[in-house]
Image: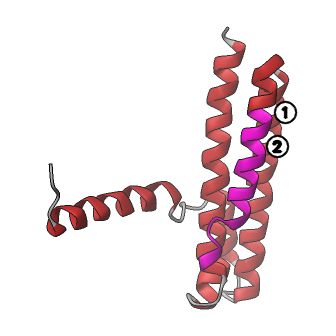
């Protein structure tokens, strides 16, 4: 079946929408939202709120990783470790376009933190599902 330009554009648009839903900025957690609300509205304050949020997400991720990794052995242990290393490389480059300056300071201090926190939270959820599977065998 040959796709027309219009069909390709619709498919591409649907793919971009799906990507935005998965990797787009996440809604803040309650602590982040409270921090933003109580801040003086400066970029420095917002950056601090975002940095703290990322630390919380990293802490959850690391705890989940330890539990999930401990539930593996043999080839699965090697495979999940290789996957995590690849994911870390992805995480380090994910959302960088928000931080590059093209989206202004708000992109750097609000959108970047939200996007990165969403990426980390999604991986935490994946690892939790893996852990549930590994422990259920």
Quarter assignment of residue 35: bottom right
Q: Residue 127 carries which label?
A: none
The quarter of the rendered structure image containing the C terminus is top right
Secondary structure of the residue carrying numbered label 1: helix
In front here: 28 or 74? 74
Q: Name the residue under label 2.
A: 62
Q: Which mark is residue 66?
A: 1
Q: Is disc 2 surrounded by few (<14), some (14 to 19) or many (20+) residues within 10 Å?
A: few
Majority secondary structure in the magenta region: helix
- Asked if the residue under mark 1 is in contact with the one under mark 2, i.e. CB atoms within 8 Å, the reply is yes
Query: Would residue 73 be visible to someone looking at this image?
Result: no
Q: What stretch is highlighted in magenta?
A: 80-97
- Residue 48 location in percent, x, y? 78, 75
Q: Is disc 1 surrounded by few (<14), some (14 to 19) or many (20+) residues within 10 Å?
A: few
- Residue 66 location in percent, x, y? 84, 33
What residue is rendered at 14% in x and 64% in y?
4
What residue is rendered at 77% in x and 28% in y?
68
């Amino acid at each position: 079946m040959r796709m027309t330009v219009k069909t390709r554009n619709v498919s591409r648009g649907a793919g971009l929408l799906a990507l935005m839903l998965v990797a787009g900025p996440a809604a803040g957690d309650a602590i982040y939202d409270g921090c933003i609300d109580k801040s003086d509205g400066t970029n420095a304050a917002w950056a601090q709120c975002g940095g703290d949020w990322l630390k919380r997400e990293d802490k959850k991720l690391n705890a989940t990783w330890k539990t999930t990794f401990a539930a593996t052995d043999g080839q699965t242990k090697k495979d999940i470790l290789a996957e995590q290393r690849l994911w870390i490389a992805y995480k380090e480059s994910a959302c960088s376009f928000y931080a590059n300056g093209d989206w202004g300071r708000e992109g750097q201090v609000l959108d970047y933190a939200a996007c990165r926190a969403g990426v980390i939270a999604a991986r935490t959820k994946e690892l939790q599902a893996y852990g549930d599977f590994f422990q259920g065998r």
